[in-house]
Amino acid sequence: MLKLVGQILLWLRGGSLKLLVIAGIILLVWGVFAPVGTLIWWVQQGAKFAGLGKDVPALPEGDRPTPEPSAASTNCYIVFLTGVGDFSANQLTPGEELFLDQLVQAHPNCVAVRDVFPYSAANESLGGNRLLAPLWRFAQEADGWLENLNILIKIRNLWRFAISVDDRYGIAYNQGIASAIVERMSAESPISASSEPITVILIGTSGGAQVALGASQYLDQWLNAEISMVSIGGVFSGTDGFKSVDQMYHLYGQRDWIEDLGAILFASRWPSTVGSPFNQAKREGDYAAQVIGSQAHDGNEGYFGLAPQPDGTTPLDATIEAVNQLPIWP
């Protein structure tokens, strides 16, 4: 045994250990500087939230064209926030696009807000006006064995997920996302000034669920709205948003082990943390979790996958059916 340990240590002294150490240092430095973009955005834009600025420029409108305003009967907004693997707000998969199209078709008084990028406080895609935009574009467009470089995009977005959870920087970051949500809601269909509350349905998948919860507390302050939260394989803490949404539903598949990480990593979701907002919501019936099928976290067998199943359906069909059955629709 000692000989084996010695051989392993000798092996680690080679290039592999050096590579791992360098990668670890890069990740740590990346994490240290991850909040910088949020803080810069806050300095430039945050004055309007504090009521200090007069001519604060509007948030970018993203890459999607602004649609014509919908009919006056619109009183429901479906806001979709994607997972950590996405490059921009308009990079929805065919399954995600079909998911939103079918929800709008089933609920004609609703419009879908598809162009909020949950990993940028300024709602700016990774290929936009950024210092590292060439790197992100290269990682996104790489093929062959270089496709593995897309892990850089996931790591980068995971740090933004962490900022949303962080008590220090999350206040600024989550307000930025909430502001982008309101701006894009209004672009899809002007928000009614009526005394009747509108319906806002936040749908987040993977890390997008946490960002949606973080933004919900500000949407609750700014809008006259009934807010529901739907997590589809989401990873989230047990603190943000549970006092702001009227109800939250967590839908997950039997083969999705990633969604379990939230319940493991965040102490606020442990049963022993009885006073956390998450556990309070569970006790009061404002939170419910439900298995909706055998879906994996992503891919063709994921929640928005289009792989044919033995019964002739797709994983997406089960997801759409489960969401449509939730008591959240006006």
Image: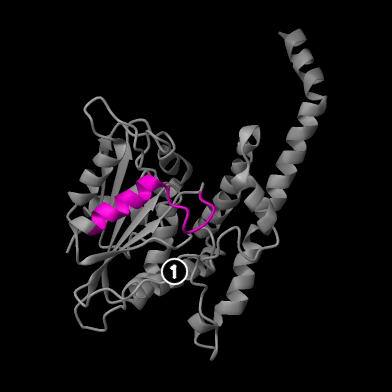
Residue drawn at x 20%, y 67% as measured from the top left: 109
Colouring of the image: one colour
Residue 11 % position (x, y): 79, 19
The part of the image, by quadrant, that contains residue 194 is bottom left
Residue 125 % position (x, y): 55, 60
Given the current orientation, which residue lies at the most extreme bottom position?
54
Q: Nearer the viewer, residue 27 or 283?
A: 27
**Residue 274 seen in this snapshot:** no
Residue 297 % position (x, y): 41, 38
Residue drawn at x 45%, y 58% as measured from the top left: 211
* Viewport quadrant of the C terminus: bottom left
Residue 192 in the figure: left or right of residue 10: left
Residue 306 in the figure: left or right of residue 171: left
Quick one: label 1, few (<14), some, or many (20+) residues within 10 Å? few
Q: Against 217, is 69 above or below?
A: below
Residue 16 in the figure: left or right of residue 196: right
**Residue 199 seen in this snapshot:** yes
Question: Label 1: which residue?
Answer: 65
Range of residues picked out in magenta: 86-104
Counting the numbered discs, the total is 1
Q: Nearer the viewer, residue 9 or 199?
A: 199
* Viewport quadrant of the N terminus: top right
Q: Nearer the viewer, residue 263 or 197?
A: 197
Q: Is residue 147 magenta?
A: no
Q: Secondary structure at mark 1?
A: loop
Amino acid type assigned to the residue bearing label 1 in the image: Pro
Residue 107 % position (x, y): 19, 60
Residue drawn at x 76%, y 36% as measured from the top left: 21
The part of the image, by quadrant, that contains residue 122 is bottom right
The part of the image, by quadrant, that contains residue 113 is bottom left
Residue drawn at x 77%, y 39% as measured from the top left: 22
